[in-house]
Image (spheres, grey):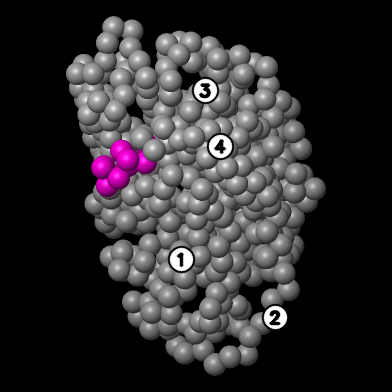
Amino acid sequence: MTRNARRRTPRADLVVVANRLPVDRVVEDDGSTSWRTSPGGLVSALEPVMRANHGAWIGWPGDTGDQPEPFDDEGLTLVPVAMSDREYAEFYEGFSNATLWPLYHDLIAKPEFHREWWDAYEVVNRRFAETAAKVAADGAIVWVQDYQLQLVPAMLRELRPDLRIGFYLHIPFPPTELFGQLPWRRQVLEGLLGADLVGFQLPGAAQNFVRLVRQRVGHKTHRDSVYLPDGRVVVAKAFPISIDFSGFEELARSVEVVERAEEIRRDLGEPRRIFLGVDRLDYTKGIYARLRAFGELISDGHFTVEDAVFVQVATPSRERVSQYKIIRDDIDRLVGRINGDLGRIGRPAISYLHSSFPREEMAALYKAADIMVVTPFRDGMNLVAKEYAACRYGEDGALVLSEFAGAAEELRQAYLVNPYDINGMKAKMLEAYHADPKELARRMRAMRRCISENDVSHWASAFLDELTANRPRHDKQVKPARTG
C-alpha cells in the first residue's frame, strides 16, 4: 500500500469527516510508524466516489500520539486529527460513549452527564470542523459521520457557508422523552441543523429529530423539512445503511473460505446445528440473554451438546469503560456456568471467542453456521445480520433477529424476536432449529434479494444524490427560536 506524506494541506471536492480514519496507526518494535487498513464497509462504499472527486477523509488515527501530516493512501487523501489522552478519556470514552451512547440506546445503561465531558466534546468537534474547513475546496461536499461529531455541521457552516454539508447518524436517535434528559440538548440539535441533509437509519428516527427541533428549538417544520431563519431548508430522511453484498458473497464462495467453514464444523464435532453470534462486546447487543436462552434449551431437553453448539464471537470494545468491564465479567461467568453444568469433555455447549477476526474468518463462520442469532436490545441497523445472509448463497440457514435492530425493518423474513422475552427467544431459536429446508430457503431468498438490491453503494449514492439535489431557499415566516 503506497502512503506518501504531504507537507501542505490538500483541497478536496468531497470530504468525509469521521471519528476514525479508515486506517490505524501502528508503532513497530523499532519505533517506526506504519498504517494498517481498518475493516468496515463505509470506506469501501465511499472509495470509488471519493477517488473520482479528489476526496479526502478526516479522522482520528487511533492513538494519542503526535498529529501526523496528511498523506495519500492509494490515491485517497487521509487527514489525521490528533487527540490527547485527556480528550480521549473525556470526549470519546466520556461524552460519546458514557453519555450519548446509552442515551441514544434507550437507557439500557444509565448515561452520565458531566460538564467537563461536554467541554471536551465541544473542543474536539471544533478541531474536526476547523480541519474540514481547511481541507474542503470551494463549494465542496462535506459528509460528517455519526454521534461523536454532532456539533461539526454548525461549526463548519459558520467557518465555510459555501459548503454543501451532510450528516449521517449510524446509531438510533431517541424519542423526545429520552433526548430531553440531555442538558445540552439544544446545542446538539443546533449543531445538526448546520447540515443541509441529516440522515438516519430509520424513518422513526428522522421523525424524532424533526419533532425535537420543532419543540426544543422552535423552528417551523413540515414533514421531513426544517425551515431556518436564514432561509435554508434542512431535510431529515432515512437512508438504511447496508453492506458490500457482492463482496461478501464472493468471499464466501472462495475455496479458502469453503474449506475453512468445513474445518470449523469438524473442529466443533459436526453437530447437527451450529448457532452463531457475532457482536462487539457491548451491553446493547443482548449477548447475555441469548446465551442464557440457549443454555435453557439444552437444560430443558430440547437438544444436547452433541446436537447443537453456540459459537459466540465477542469483539473487544471500549475495555477501559466500566460498563464494558461489567458485561464482560458477567458473560465470562455465564459461559463458565453453562459449560460446567451442561458441557462434556471435548463438547462445550458454548464456544466463546473474545477476540476480533479478519473478514475471511468471519465469512467462514457465517458459512459454517446454521442459525445466526442477532438479538440486540437496540441497534441502529446491525450489519452482521446482512453479512450472514450475503454469505448464504445456497439459500440455506436461518436468521433469528431482534425486532429492535434496524435491520428488522428490511429483513421481515427473519425469525423476529423480542430480546427481553427469554421464553419467546427460546421458541424462535427452536423453530429455526427444526425448520423445514424449503421454508428456510424461502426466507433466505427474500432477505438476500432485499440486501443485494439495497447494498452499501446504493446507500451512499442515495444520500449523496439527495444532498446535492437543488433545494431552493424558503421565504416562510419562521418563529423566533425558544429556549430549551
Mark 3: amino acid: Ala
Please identify the quarter of the rendering in which residue 317 is found: top left
**Gap between marks 2 and 3, in whole Å?**
53 Å
Give the residue number, with chain letter if any, for mark 4: 438
Q: Is residue 241 left or right of residue 289?
A: right
Q: Which one is closest to the eye, mark 1 or mark 4?
A: 4
> Which labelled disc corresponds to residue 204?
1
Image x and y of residue 279, in percent: 42, 35
Name the mark nearer the viewer: 3 or 1.
3
Task: Decide: few, some or many residues near mark 3? Use Cα within 10 Å; few <14, some 14-19, many ≥20.
Answer: many
Q: Residues within 10 Å of mark 1 (few under 14, many from 20)?
A: some
- Assign a secondary structure to mark 1: helix
Choose the circle earlier in sequence order: 2 or 4.
4
Name the amino acid type tagged 2: Pro
Mark 4: amino acid:
Lys
Residue on which disc 3 sits: 368
